[in-house]
Amino acid sequence: MKHRRVRVLMPLSGKDLYDYRAPAALGIEIGHFVTVPLGKREVTGVVWEEAAASDVAEERMKDILAVLPCAPLPAESIRFIDWVAQYTMQRKGRVLRMAMSVPEALYPKAARIGYRLTAARPERMTAARQRVLDIAAEAGVQSAADLASLAGVSASVVKGLAEAGALEPVVLPSDAPLERPDWRHGAFELSPDQKAAADALAADVAARNFAASLLDGVTGSGKTEVYFEALAACLREGRQALVLLPEIALTAQWLDRFEARFGARPVEWHSDLGQSERRRNWRAVIEGRAEIVIGARSALFLPFADLGVIIVDEEHETSFKQDEGVPYNARDMAVVRGKIGSCPVVLASATPSLETMLNARSGKYRHLKLPSRFGGAVLPDVELIDLKQHRPGPQRWISEPLRLAMEATLGEGQQVMLFLNRRGYAPLTLCDACGHRLQCPNCSAWLVEHRLINRLQCHHCGYSTRLPGACDACGAEESFKPCGPGIERLSEEAASLFPERRVAMMASDTITSPRAAAEFVAAMDRGEIDILIGTQIVAKGYHFPNLTLVGVIDADLGLTGGDLRAAERTYQLLSQVMGRAGRESIRGKVYLQSHLPEHPVIAAIVHQESEAFFNLEAAGRESAGMPPFGRLAALILSGPKAESVASFAAELARRAPAGERLAILGPAPAPLSMIRGRHRYRFLIKCAKDVSIQAIIGKWLQGCRLPSDIRLQIDIDPYNFM
């Protein structure tokens, strides 16, 4: 008799699916998390599909050992993982690993023991015992540790009361109950434009059908309040919701606004969580107890039991694109996840990506517009400072017009922000005796000086060292000098110009968690910071009521380097930075310092002509056949020996496909030709939009044996060209 066979997927990088017998006694279903024998070990996996046509001999077939005590992986998650693996050309097991990122969550946490008051009273009563009994009477069932803490006594006092019968043990849930957001709690008063958009999104949620909408509103227009109404509709329907944010530091102010609207905190998912929180939250998601989840891009792979809406806030942000591991764009995959789960997807931005804007214009996405700031606030005035005419002077970066504007703003009791998208003190350190530059030993990148911690750091691999006392190239002592500014150096200059003012810096180095961001925001709100100096992290969604002046130190910084999206990214970043100014009743001012005032991006920013910019950018991409009018993929080869990588790249080039609607660029050393000690060569595949780029790559690599010391990374729809 042939027993039922199923295929099991394991979160591994090797072979995708293995066939196993499914013992009837285990009641195995598709999606069950199971343990199976694999070689000499036992491995956890997911029952993925039936294997009725399995051709494995009966004597070689092994049994599934156990079903784990966890809700099964939802069918929608299985379909999503299959789709992502096929699209990105990655092993299914690698994608599954992102959905099974907390292995301990597959097992229930041991139950907790709490204590409650009984009618009995101990024969011997002390003041400490009385405090515990009073707390138990008032607070109800509590753990021994909580009772002791609240009463200010040792655990032995609680234990003694339990032994005396005055307290009795009660089994508590293994995790403290999650806060439940209430859609009726505190609805905001919406403007007519906001209400029209909110009603449309809420109707999509209630209809339980897939629909993609672009929520396109200028900075400060109240997009968050609009999509909160979609979340409220999801809560009314009893379904789960997911909000993706590009930076975990953004969650500080967002969480406050969420709590004001719904009376509770959402479930969080990001790298700053402790392992215990991650275990609890993952399990709450798969069991359907997590009603609204806010998270970074990885939250998209959480196993939602009943997902009712997905919000992608700041959808244009490049941090939604993952380059390491499984390369994917969370914005695009969110749309796929919504389609698979028949739930609406909302893409929100003040500066939509070209891809999303074209989908909205073509009617593929609904286009919801919020053309004005909320509450009567107006967009800031913009002034261009031509640095060829207003040179700041040697080792200075704040021009005289900007300095005067800062002086006037500070004199009126308002706050100033200076924006420079460079961390550290200086981007380059060189010997002024021989010109030798300090470079990372593991990467083809210059070391960045961070003077606050007295270190040189590589922003690609994390290498860190002290500034050498003498130059290795020429032997000159104390000869190294910083070149160019980072925010630490700019902060130094601001402090020297305004010695009585309080200067603070905000960058990914200094704001490493939501808690740190919340403390920083609170300091800004209390007026404890006069001049804020930041990198791109300050551009992302913060609302500082008393910030009325923004100075952009180098508006041209992102326009060079040959990146396909350089102009678009610069336009988006500068627009978002400008949007921090004047978000309340006082009109804001923005000063853009530029060496290229005639550049189309700078002109579009100054005149706030978003439509003209996007039309120009779209025309340029279309004429070149570049995304979103064509398709790109990258093949990146890396290895410890440059010669081996170059040799294998040449072999691949000889096998490269050819065609009229296809171009293979390369192989060539990547712009960052070495990262973490691995030398890198890359191919860029360009083809027409209606051509399957995955099929081309699959045929190209078929039968190709990769040397053991070389890695091949396939990146479909690359964003990073370094």
Image (tube, helix red, strand yellow):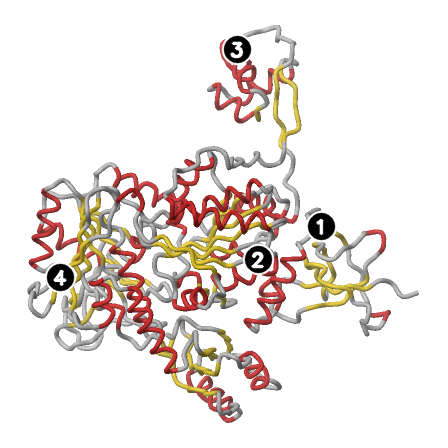
**Image quadrant assignment for residue 239:** top right
Q: Residue type at mark 1? A: Leu
Q: Position of residue 357 (x, y in %)?
A: 40, 65
Residue lying farthest to the bottom in this orientation: 654
Residue position for label 4: 397
Q: Is residue 46 visible?
A: yes
Helix or strand or loop: what does disc 1 sit on?
A: loop
Disc on res. 210: 2
Of callouts 4 and 1, the N-terminal one: 1
Of callouts 1 and 3, the N-terminal one: 1
Looking at the rendering, in which quadrant would you find the N terminus? bottom right
Residue 244 horizontal side relative to residue 512, left or right: right
Residue position for label 1: 68
Helix or strand or loop: what does disc 2 sit on?
A: loop
Do labels 2 and 3 touch, CB within 8 Å?
A: no
Instruction: Give me the residue at 12% from left, 46% from top.
Output: 409
Residue 131 horizontal side relative to residue 459, left or right: right
